[in-house]
Image (cartoon, grey):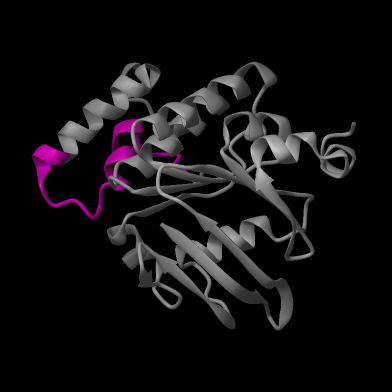
Amino acid sequence: MLEVKDIHCGYDGAPVIRGLSLEVCEGEIVAILGANGAGKSTTMRTICGLMHPEKGQILFRGEDITRSPASVNIRKGISYIPEGRRLFPKLSVRENLELGAFTVTDRAVIEERLEEMFTIFPKLRDRSSQTAETLSGGEQQMCAIARGLMSGPKLIMLDELSLGLMPSLVEKVFETVDLINRQGITVLLVEQMVQEALDIANRGYVLQTGRVVHSGTARELLDSDEVKKAYMGM
């Protein structure tokens, strides 16, 4: 479904990603792991079209999207939920979700997707008229995920879902990602919680200074002494 081939990119001439390649097959959950500053979020921003690589190629479902902007990629079926949730605090939960469906012109489809989101996230139904700023951290994260699903994506990209959440909420977030995947949506996620991410992932890539230094099945990475020592404190 997604092929990233030898991409190089950075900020203001400073390289961040150096020859990175990865692939995501349809139906998979793939985790991108690594320490802070490894280039994980830059990789996600480049794939979704918020940044463009200086070199390399990105293919989505066989189509070259290397220079395609994020607004176009959403219509192609790529949804990106950035780190920090980025909700509109003064808008209601329902309004935030409707903004996620800005590419959809059929009102009946929007209402159908809203109902789907309220079924997956029942607390959002209860909070639908509240402003996003009144939600708890966990509820805000659920709202951000739901907004990303409103466009009807084929691939959803999730950046640091567990960041800032209480431990009791982290398990629920990962259960939700697994549920989304079982409904047929391919998932690419960046996550600091290595164990939890690999527990639900099919495969993973470990980044260091903008390069892939380890890759394999989730089990292979969980069993790797080097990965355990460097990223899991074991």
Q: Nearer the viewer, residue 123 or 40?
A: 40
Q: How many marks?
A: 0
Rendered location of residue 28, percent (x, y): 47, 42
In which quadrant is the N terminus drawn?
bottom left
**22 relative to 143 in the view: left or right:** right
Query: Residue at image x 78%, y 52%?
Result: 36
In the image, taking residue 196 as reference, residue 79 lies left or right, namely left
In magenta stretch: residue 169:
no
Nearer-the-camera pick, 50 or 224: 224
Q: Residue at x 84, y 37 (%)?
A: 228
In this orientation, does residue 135 appear? Answer: no
**x, y percent for residue 86:** 50, 46
Q: Does residue 81 appear in this view?
A: yes
Instruction: Name the image quarter holding residue 160.
Output: top right
Residue shown at the point (65%, 68%) measured from the top left: 20
The residue closer to the viewer here, 103 or 77, is 77
Q: Could you say where residue 222 lies in the image, as x and y percent from the top left?
A: 75, 35
Nearer the observer, 74 or 198: 198
Above or below, 140 relative to 8 = above
Q: Quadrant of the C terminus?
A: top right
The correct choice, above or below, for 155 with respect to 223 in the image is below
Q: Is residue 143 above or below residue 71?
A: above
Judge left or right: residue 6 versus residue 89: right
Q: Name the residue rendered at 89%, 34% in the picture.
A: 233
Q: Which residues are magenta?
A: 87-109
User: Residue 212 appears in which quarter of the rendering?
Assistant: bottom right
Q: Please tell me whether residue 90 belongs to the stretch shown in magenta.
A: yes
